[in-house]
Amino acid sequence: MGAPLLWMILLGLSQLPAFPPGTELRVVSPDLLTVYSSGRVEDGYLTIDLPLDVGTEVRVLAFGPGVSDEEVALALSGGAALRGHVAADRADILLLLPDRAEPVSLRQWLLEEHGITLVLVTRRTR
């Protein structure tokens, strides 16, 4: 399939292609060393376990279906990912995009642009 499809990073939210079944979204630490959670698009849903507190800074990566482990490792070594943080209600991730003054709701964008419902399973960490 070629290089990983880091759509959100390379193209910006407005130009992303559809998230076909099997697309993986990873929520990682700012240094990209810790994967907090990940999920795959299945039957119009993207379910992610989000064991993080309000305001926790994260990075978000998206990979198309069928991407090899080697391609994922290469993408992670580049250090490129979308910046964001856990929303006040812990039911969303707010993405900080360079071309937008206000944070963008990942939940709203997935639903409105792609018909994908984001399900965040939250647990208290304290």
Image (cartoon, rainbow, N blue to C red):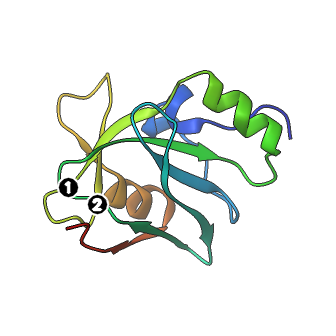
Above-or-below relation of 85 to 99: below
Tell me the number on the disc at residue 92: 2
Across and down, in percent, residue 17 comes to: 61, 45
Under circle 2, the secondary element is loop
- Residue in view at x 44 percent, y 30 percent: 31
> Circle 1 is placed at which residue position?
87
Mark 2: amino acid: Asp
Across and down, in percent, residue 79 comes to: 54, 24
Label 1, residues with CA under 10 Å away: few <14, some 14-19, many ≥20: some
Under circle 1, the secondary element is loop
Query: Residue 24's image quarter?
Result: bottom right
- Residue in view at x 31 percent, y 40 percent: 84
Instruction: Tell whether label 1 touches label 2 (CB within 8 Å).
Output: yes
- Residue in view at x 19 percent, y 68 percent: 126
Above-or-below relation of 17 to 6: below
Query: Residue 103's image quarter?
Result: top left
Mark 1: amino acid: Ala
Across and down, in percent, residue 96 comes to: 29, 34
Above-or-below relation of 28 to 117: above
Q: Earlier in the sequence, mark 2 or mark 1?
A: 1
Across and down, in percent, residue 105 comes to: 28, 51
